């Protein structure tokens, strides 16, 4: 398995590392964040470097050095071999990752400790790095994929990454002896296609000496591939490349294209089962950002260059809390709110300010229990988070602690001056919604008292009405920007815009 790859000098990439790779690896990020450039660079021999941990083959290194040093009487192998072994053991203990462009530096370090030992190294480290390189055979499956519905019969047609040639390949496999490996490969492709899509395919010859491929499921008739949804062709292309025997490292751009969520899940599961291959997928889909399936999740972004960060651990934490990993990683801003009933009010506020449609804004309701226990480190690293809490004294300790933690982690947190966000409702909006149930004596909302109490919703236990929170969406729809002016909710809007602008500026390449 290839665990360490560096890519350099390709488009906006200077030097990017993909470390501790597993069998199934994901790169996510916003549009134009460098995901495709990273995959392209891996395909270019002049842009990629494969790294290895010294400890991965330490005895082979020692044995090779020993066989060479043992052939000399001067310098004495009783001196050079122990010196070299000691040097290698230290590197192994530090989990040192070796790349070809670091070999000279490594020999210089050994030379400082023992010139005699360093003088016998020769090309040992290059040979160590070349071992896996000899078998590294990557393939990039592009985002634009197609299956040709009708093609001339051409048994030796080349199979292209975009799917060209696959129709002829399948026709050839299908027509082999049923006991042959080729026919078994055909059946595996057919079975995998059915498992993922719920469809089957057939390939037949036409009267004009051509072949055609069609799809169907239990509820449809046969239809040519190009008459069906593009998702079916996309899946077939990915399956064929994933099961081929030639390539061992498959790069797939946007595997979710044209696929509904259930099909995405099945495709992800299919790829995970192919233990003979390694995969790197670039995606926007939250389905593929599942840390319980993916071995590694990276986030790509562009500032002055393409940068890649390892998000695997944070993704596990967010997933365990029930949050979408995608939202934290690819949004302009994530708004932490106290509860789901706050969201319609904040959405309306942002719409009135012309902000909601301009930026990619996601809301995450925390709730009191989560707010009390949440480790904010999982949010702080991304620098695209803002929190908003009210002043309800009943849970004042939790809020105070939460606000303090936000400050410590560098997260902007707005603590509203009023009792709760519902205390910002206007009298006119309340009257329009509550009509006859609105208290006639109420002419002004007390900012420091629970609104339900002021409306009489909680005074009479026998005839207690539902909380006003159940009508938040309806009430706030009657409010105007003027109703919010001069309040600290507008401060929240200004701070949110600042965060969004910083997020956007970080996504705009300067290369």
Image: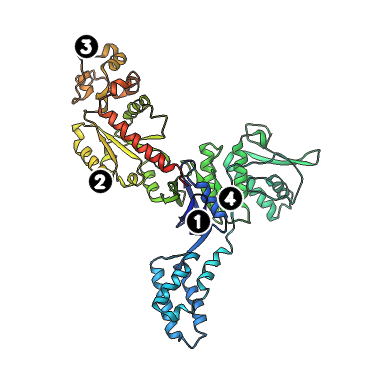
Q: Which residue is mark 2?
A: 408
Q: Which of 160/466 is in front?
A: 160
Count of numbered circles on the image: 4
**SS at circle 3:** loop
Question: Element under label 2?
Answer: helix
Answer above or below: position of 22 versus 263. below
Q: Are marks 2 and 3 in contact (CB under 8 Å)?
A: no
Q: Residues within 10 Å of mark 3 (few under 14, many from 20)?
A: few
Q: What kind of colouring is applied to the model shown?
A: rainbow
89 shown above or below 459: below
CA–CA distance in space, label 4 to label 2: 43 Å
Along the viewing direction, whichever of 361 and 268 lies nearer the viewer: 361
Q: Residue at x 63, y 53 (%)?
A: 244
* Label 1 crowd (10 A; few <14 / some 14-19 / many >=20): some
Return the disc, 3 or 1, that comes first in the chain's sequence. 1
First along the sequence among labels 2 and 1: 1
User: In the image, 85: left or right of 135?
Assistant: left
**Residue 403 location in percent, x, y?**
24, 40
The answer to whether residue 161 is visible is yes
- Give the class, few, some or many, for how many residues have Cα within 10 Å of label 2's Cα (few <14, many ≥20): few
Residue 451 horizontal/vertical position (percent): 23, 23
Do the CB atoms of the residues marked 2 and 1 lie less than 8 Å apart? no
Q: Which residue is mark 3?
A: 440
Q: Earlier in the sequence, mark 4 or mark 3?
A: 4
SS at mark 4 in the image: strand
Q: Nearer the viewer, mark 2 or mark 1?
A: 1
Tell me the number on the disc at residue 8: 1
- Residue where numbered disc 4 is placed: 140
Which of pointers 4 and 2 lies earlier in the amino acid sequence? Answer: 4
């Amino acid at each position: 398995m290839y665990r360490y790859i560096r890519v350099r000098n390709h488009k906006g990439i200077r030097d990017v590392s993909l470390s501790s790779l597993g069998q199934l690896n994901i790169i996510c990020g916003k549009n134009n964040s460098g995901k495709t450039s990273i995959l392209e660079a891996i395909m270019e021999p002049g842009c990629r470097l494969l790294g290895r941990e010294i400890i991965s083959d330490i005895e082979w290194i020692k044995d090779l050095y020993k066989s060479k040093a043992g052939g000399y009487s001067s310098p004495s192998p009783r001196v050079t071999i122990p010196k070299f072994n000691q040097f290698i053991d230290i590197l192994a203990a530090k989990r040192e990752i070796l790349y070809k462009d670091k070999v000279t530096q490594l020999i210089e370090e050994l030379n400082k400790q023992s010139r005699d030992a360093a003088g016998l190294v020769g090309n040992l480290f290059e040979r160590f790095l070349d071992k896996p390189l000899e078998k590294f055979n990557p393939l990039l499956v592009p985002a634009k994929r197609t299956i040709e519905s009708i093609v001339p019969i051409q048994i030796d047609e080349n199979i292209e990454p975009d799917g060209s040639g696959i129709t002829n390949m399948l026709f050839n496999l299908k027509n082999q002896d049923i006991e042959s490996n080729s026919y078994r490969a055909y059946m595996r492709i057919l079975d995998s296609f059915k498992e993922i899509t719920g469809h089957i395919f057939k390939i037949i010859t036409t009267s004009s000496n051509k072949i055609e491929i069609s799809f169907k499921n239990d509820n449809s008739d046969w239809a040519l591939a190009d008459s069906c949804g593009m998702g079916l062709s996309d899946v077939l292309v990915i399956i064929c490349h994933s099961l081929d025997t030639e390539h061992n490292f498959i790069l797939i751009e946007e595997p979710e294209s044209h696929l509904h969520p259930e099909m995405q899940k099945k495709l992800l599961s299919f790829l995970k089962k192919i233990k003979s291959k390694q995969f790197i997928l670039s995606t926007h889909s939250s389905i593929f950002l599942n840390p319980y399936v993916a071995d590694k999740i990276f986030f790509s972004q562009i500032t002055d260059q393409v940068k890649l960060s390892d998000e695997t651990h944070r993704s596990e934490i967010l997933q365990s809390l029930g949050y979408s990993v995608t939202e934290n990683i690819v949004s302009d801003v994530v708004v932490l709110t106290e509860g789901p009933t706050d969201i319609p009010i904040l959405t309306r506020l942002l719409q009135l300010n012309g902000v909601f449609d301009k930026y990619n804004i996601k809301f995450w309701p925390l709730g009191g229990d989560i707010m009390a226990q949440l480790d904010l480190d999982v949010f702080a690293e991304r620098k695209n988070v803002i929190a908003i809490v009210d002043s309800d004294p009943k849970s004042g300790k939790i809020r105070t602690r939460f606000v303090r933690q936000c400050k410590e982690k560098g997260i902007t947190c707005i603590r509203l001056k009023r009792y709760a966000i519902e205390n910002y409702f206007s009298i006119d909006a309340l009257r329009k919604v509550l009509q006859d149930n609105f208290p006639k004596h109420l002419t002004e909302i007390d900012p420091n008292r629970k609104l339900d109490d002021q409306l009489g919703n909680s005074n009479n236990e026998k005839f207690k009405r539902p909380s006003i929170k159940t009508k938040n969406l309806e009430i706030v729809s009657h409010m105007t920007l003027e109703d919010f002016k001069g309040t600290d909710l507008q401060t929240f809007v200004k701070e949110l815009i600042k965060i969004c602008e910083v997020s956007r500026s970080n996504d705009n390449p300067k290369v």
